[in-house]
Amino acid sequence: MKASYKKYILNFKRPSGTSRGVLTTKETWFIVLEENGKLGIGECGILRTLSCDDVPNYEEKLKWVCDNIQLGLPVLLENLMDFPSIQFGLEQAFISLSGTTPFKLFSSDFTERENPIPINGLIWMGDEAYMLKQIQQKLAQGFKCIKLKIGAIDFETELSLLASIRCKYDEHTIELRVDANGAFSQTEALDKLKALSEFKLHSIEQPIKAGGWSAMKGLCENTPLPIALDEELIGVFSVTQKEKLIQTIQPQFIILKPSLVGGIKGCEEWISLAEKHNIGWWVTSALESNIGLNAIAQWTYTLNSNMPQGLGTGGLYTNNFDSPLTVKNGTLFYDKGKKWKQNLISDLCI
């Protein structure tokens, strides 16, 4: 078996705002395996400033993986505990290599019968006019669940945007989720949650910065609306530590991003613990290209969740890879009439 890697820069169609800043490009890396004339590919979707494996020796670790690919997947994963995005890229690559085609990782009614996955429509931060325009577009596109990034513009303006939606659509018609990305201070968080709860929200993601387990526990105990942990899961590797976090904070939901929490294996550990403690969960992409998103979507479908997932990010880039992944009527489905670019993997090896 041979292994190689390549860096790729994804360009946003429009600068996309979060409480941590505005994104114009997204760095990603691909691992390609070759054995007996077959190819497999996986995406290592690092998020600079957020991923715990945003370290200076990231590329050096990728090279080590490729030089030691003969160790096999289980051994490599054990040696990559601090590099969750590479763990996920490797899982993808090995599954891709073993499949009938490189882009069919999990055969199911998603890939074979075009059964859809319900997803949320993502509203990026911006000025009021831009956010309102996005909301109108998502509603016109048939989304029944909308997620708004909040925490970067004036809070009263964000409340007015939510009010404008609820004036037209009640909670039974449109499910609203918000994501603060840790933007609220610990002292103001509960008051802001109370203000947000007036709009019958499904949940709020990561209201305060990760790492303050005691403060987050207090919020989850007293919150007037469900809290979903996101960044809080990053860097928590062992099953023991995962259970300690779950038992300490006792959130209402957790959000699983395979590239940030250790791939499929890491996510399934979180799911097992969440279900053990009666905590809800859903899966979200971490701004991967369509190669990584394809793997996440196919795996997510096998989990048989009825909740809207966060998988609507394939149309963000000008230089993404054409794929069968298609968003329609608030769902993601695998359009068998569309094809991956011929020789795509070979081109990435060059």
Image (tube, rainbow, N blue to C red):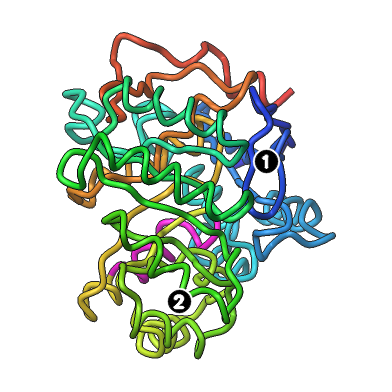
**Cα–Cα span, label 1 and label 2:** 39 Å
Quarter-of-image position of residue 11? top right
Residue at disc 1, secondary structure: strand
Horizontally, residue 194 falls left or right of residue 56, namely: left
Extent of the magenta region: 260-271
Pick the quarter of the image with the C terminus.
Answer: top right
Mark 1 closeness class: few <14, some 14–19, many ≥20 residues within 10 Å: many
Looking at the image, residue 345 sits to the left or right of residue 202; the answer is right
| Location of residue 290 in the rendering, given as x and y in whole percent from the top left corner | 50, 29
Return the residue at label 1: 29
Give the residue at x 36% y 21%. 326
Circle 2 sits on which residue? Answer: 190
In the displayed structure image, the side of residue 52 where residue 87 appears, left or right: left
Q: Is residue 76 magenta?
A: no
Residue 166: x and y in percent read 29, 42
| Between discs 1 and 2, the one toward the N terminus | 1
Depth check: 174 or 278 in front? 174
Q: Is residue 144 above or below residue 189?
A: above
Please say whether residue 267 is one of the residues in the magenta stretch.
yes
